[in-house]
Structures are given as C-alpha cells and as structure tokens.
Image (tube, rainbow, N blue to C red):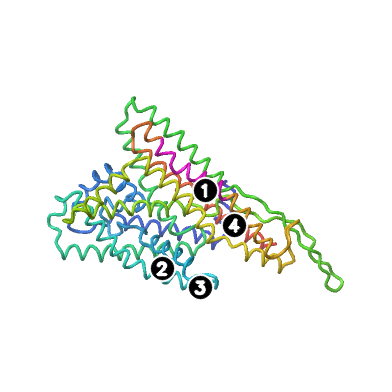
Amino acid sequence: MFKKLSQIWKIKDLRNSILFVMGMLVIFRVIAHIPIPGVAAAGLKQVFSSNQILGLLNIFSGGTMENFSVAMLGIAPYITASIIFQLLAMVVPYLEELSKEGEYGRQKINQWTRLLTIPLAFFQSFAMISLLKRSVPDLFSDFGAWEMITAMVTITAGTIFLMWLGELISEKHVGNGISLLIFAGIISGLPTAVGSILYTYDQSQIINMLIFAVIAIVTIVGVVVITEGQRNIPVSYARRIRGNKMYGGVDTHLPLRVNQAGVIPIIFAISIILLPSMVAQMLVGVKTAWLAAAAQWIIQLFENQLFYGIIYFVLVVVFTYFYTAIIFHPDQIAENLQKQGGFVPGIRPGRPTAEYLQKVVTRIVFTGALFLGVIAVLPLITAQITDTQNLVVGGTSLLIVVSVVIETVNQINGQLSMRDYEEI
C-alpha cells in the first residue's frame, strides 16, 4: 500500500488532482456549517435524530439539514434532475438520439440537467422549510414571508454551488464528484456517532453493538464482492496480413462487471423513496379533508417497516438494471469488435454478438442487483430484531461509503495503469 501511495505522490498531475479534490471536500464541509440566519439550529438536531426519514435526508446532505445550512439540500435536487432526464431519454426520441451523439450530446443533456436543478432546488427548499416549520413551529416563530424567500434563494444558491464543486471533482478523474460529496458528508458525522455511542455506553447494548459489527463486516465484504466481481467474455482477433506483416491473432477477454452501476442505484432509490413522505408531510395540515387524510395514510404506510423495506429492495434492484442499461451499450461494443476484427468464439459478429452480450449482462446483473438489494435492506431487518433505528442509518451509510471508496480507488488505479502504459 505504501508503495502505491509513494507512486501516486511522485506523479505530479495525479498528486495535484487528489489534493484539489481534498480541498474541494474541505470547502464543502465549511459550507455545511454556515447556517441560515433566523433559526436556532441547535433545536433541530433532536428532531432529525428522532425521525427516520429526516435522519436519512440529513445523512445524504452531510449533516447540513440539522445545521440549517445554506447547503441544507446537498446535491439532492441535482440527483433528481439527473433521474428525470435519464428517464426522459428512454421515452423521448430526441433525447435518446442526443444521448447517442457522444460528448456533444452528453454536454447538452448535462446543461439541461443543471437548468432543471434550479427550480427543483427552489421547490424542495420550500418543501423542507415547510416540513420543519410543522415539526418544530417554535423555532420558526419569527420566520415571515421575507425570511422564507431569502432562505429559499440562499438554499438554491448553495445547491448550485455544490453541484459546481461536484463537477469540478469529477473532471479530475479520481472519483465521482457527487458520490464523493455524499461520502464526505457521511464520514464527517462518524466522530460524532462514535462519541455518542461511547457516551451512552450501556452493557445491555453489547449484543446490539456486536450485531451491528457483524452487519458492518458483512456489508463491506458483500459490497467488495459484487463491485469487484466480473464475467470475462473471451474475444479473439482474426489474423490480418498487410504487406509482409501479420497483425492480430490475439486471444483476450471482455470484462463485464456484476454491478456496473456502482453506488448510483442506492442514491436513486433513497431519493425516490423519501419523496412521497416529504410531500405527505407538507399536505397533512391542509384544510381539504380528503387530501389531509390521504397524506396521513401515506405517512403511516411508509412508517411500516415491512412496506418500506420491500419498496427499498425493489427500487434498488430496478435502478441497478435501469442504470446498467444506460451505461452499457452492447450494440456499440459489438460494432467496435467487428470493426477491429474481433469476435466472440462461437458467436457470429454483429447483431448476434450484441444479443449475446445483452443476455450475459442481464443474467449477471440480476445476481448483482439481488445481492445489492439484500445488503440494502439487511440493516432494516436487524433494526427490527434489536429494536433500534441506529443500524438503519449506519448500514445505509456504510454501503455508500464502501462503494464510493472502491470506485475512487479503481479510478486512481486506472490512471496509474494508463501512465505505466504511456511510459512503455
């Protein structure tokens, strides 16, 4: 490991990229502790610690919500906008064609995603403030219309700033910027969580702590296995003669990962599953009787751990398939292989190769999606056994942390390998 760190440090541009990313994460943590004036943020911490939905929202914002920070929404509106455009690209022909136009199409869709983030952040800031005002009305007694508008504009600006930081980080190719921001937010709360456990230490909780340790180990091992696992498709290149020289005749393989989507399905699933409860919390106090009753029913439905766990599991599995379909294009791979004189032994080049690759990916992704879904809901099952909600938050956080670390390490190793190849 020390040899690898030494190698990274000696490569100037890679070292500067890592230091740049670390600096951006420090800026993010500074922004996370700048509160919006007019609210006693200290009184919000008890609310977030006692509410599972708000607790999960607070985790994915990096603790910015309980601080009532200028970046209290984190990058949630940007994630929502990304989900919307990825869904639209599957049903709108123009967007589908644009997504296939390479770098130009990707930049165009990214620009529209940024623009959509602004109204989404403005709306979500209003929804969150309204939700908190209903949860702790005493803390917002002096929060009038002007204060509300000022806070919404400030929160929207904070979200756009974090979106910009995330894109700057991604450009350095040492990790996904959005994932690293979520990672930094989760890690920043670790010292406080450990200190709280030690402060409230009770011998009667030893069994729960041991169960949590086992769950943590199983989660880490499981995420590593499904992230690093891959199916190697054999590929042969035909011999070609040009003049007096012979080219090709090489046997290699095409690696297909079990979980090509990484941590994105978890982030998508959490973003979607929290939305109905947030909207219902806003509507529960309306004067229309049927609307208030429907909102209350939705709140009670999502408080049911069985229903919550099933929906969470299904969403993780569905989004794993969904995101894999977006990033993996068997038609393009088959076409590139055919152009380069490569073929899968026993499979005809072209369309049959694309169908074969799609069939293999569908099978291996099923295993990865199922395993990822089980790991995601495992803390929920354990929480029912131990009668504590801490494991729910801890397990979900651990799942994301491990996945982001693996993704970042793989990107750094990829840059090291690329530089070794260039030296040769």
Instruction: Give the residue drawn at x 50%, y 57%.
Output: 322
Say which of 49 and 273 sits in front. Answer: 273
Instruction: Give the residue drawn at x 26%, y 42%.
Output: 50
Mark in the foreground, 4 or 1: 1
SS for callout 4: helix
Q: Residue furthest left?
A: 142
The amino acid type found where label 1 is placed reads Ala
- The residue that disc 1 covers is 369
Q: Main secondary structure of the magenta part?
A: helix
Q: Which mark is residue 250?
A: none
* Location of residue 355 by image quarter: bottom right
- Other-residue count near label 2 (Cα within 10 Å), few / some / many at <14 / 14–19 / ≥20: many
Q: Earlier in the sequence, mark 2 or mark 4?
A: 2
Q: Which mark is residue 98?
A: 3
Instruction: Tell me the magenta residue range.
Output: 365-381
Give the spatial CA distance, label 1 vs label 2. 27 Å
- The residue that disc 4 covers is 414
- Asked if residue 108 is positioned above or below residue 25 in the image, the reply reads below
Q: Does residue 32 belong to the magenta stretch?
A: no
Q: Earlier in the sequence, mark 2 or mark 3?
A: 3
Q: Earlier in the sequence, mark 1 or mark 2?
A: 2
The amino acid type found where label 4 is placed reads Gly
Q: Earlier in the sequence, mark 4 or mark 3?
A: 3
Give the spatial CA distance, label 2 vs label 4. 28 Å
Mark in the foreground, 1 or 2: 1
Place of residue 287 in the rendered image (x, y in percent of width and height, measured from the top left): 16, 56
